[in-house]
Amino acid sequence: GTVISICFIPVFSSLLAPFQCQEHPNRKFTLQDYHGVFCNFAEEHLQMCIIGSVACLLPIGFLALCTWVVLVEVPRRQSRSDLSFLSAWSFLFIRFRPGTQVFSVLFLVRNALVVLCQLLSSESAKVVLLNLMLYISLVLTAYKKPWRFMVCNWLDILLLTGLMVIVDMGAVTMRDRPQTAMIICICFLSCMMAAILAAVVFGAWKYVRQKYRKRFNFFITHEKSAAGCLARLLKMELVAAGKTVFIDSDDLVDVSCLCRYVSHDTQKLLILATPEILKRRFCLAEMATAQLCEVPSIVLTWPKFQ
């Protein structure tokens, strides 16, 4: 699934090659990639069109399947706590914040439209459609910020802006100074490549830092009504001893980041096991994350805890 998602545009584009024709000065059309084949839907071209049409069912079916999984099956399986299904299809939504999983489908639809706009015969129609998709993507990304890490949202916004500038510069006819447009496009391409490289370096540095130097020594998971005061007292004592402690009422900005704090930023999980803690879904999620990510846990058990 991950490989298909990454290669969706080149695979879909290659399958549509029999339908991409180019006009010549003699008013005849040939395929863009195969200049020896005329676009007449006969003989060799007809065979290529039939094979391409059947092969296009693969990316279209993949898009339909992903849409059904994200919109229908994921909410249903989450309510049943079907971890095996969610793990199998996590390549679709693990990159996005909780609640924004639909963006995985929106991005696939955008990629499909980018490929399909190549079939338009009018160059102006291609530019208009491509600009429209880029503008919509930019607005949705800036408004919703769907990526799990904020640096990815800013990188996506920067890349979309650069692509729009390049497309717009290519659409503008500058007969008196054609070199100016080329210089601007090269500058934006350079900035985009530099931004991608910076994001990769930043991600690698952050991964190494989180692996060998955790942000918090302790993460206190607790039920506020029964152990809120004790959690506060424990944090005060641990901080006084020079330890860094996470407690959600002080440090949490986004509730969707709780499990990421446990898996990436915590050395040890401190569980205040009160009788009702197993009825708190966030506490269960934190404990399950610690178990899956092999984060050591310390359990302080209350007398009536079972």
Image: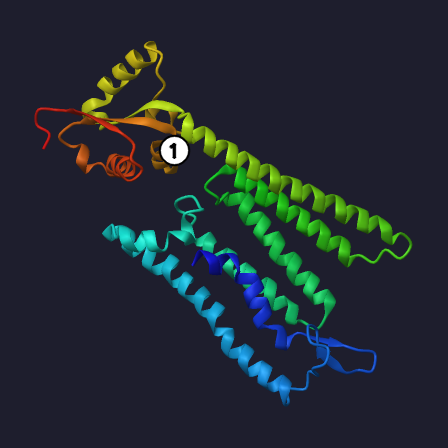
Q: How is the image coloured?
A: rainbow
Of the residues shown, which amino acid type is indicated by label 1? His
The local secondary structure at tag 1 comes to: helix
Residue 293 location in percent, x, y?
A: 31, 37
Residue 246 visible here = no
Query: Is 298 on the left-hand or right-hand side of 241?
Result: left
Query: Is 68 on the left-hand or right-hand side of 76?
Result: right
User: Residue 279 or 217: which is nearer the viewer?
Assistant: 217
Label 1, residues with CA under 10 Å away: few <14, some 14-19, many ≥20:
some
Of all residues shown, which one is farthest toward the right?
Answer: 176
State which quarter of the image contains the C terminus: top left
Q: Mark 1 sits on what residue?
A: 264
- Residue drawn 43% across and 48% down? 100
Residue 72 location in percent, x, y?
A: 34, 60
Residue 286 location in percent, x, y?
A: 28, 35
How many marks can you see?
A: 1
Query: Is 57 on the left-hand or right-hand side of 83?
Result: right
Query: Is 177 on the left-hand or right-hand side of 165?
Result: right
- Residue drawn 63% across and 67% down? 117
- Residue drawn 41% across and 47% down? 94
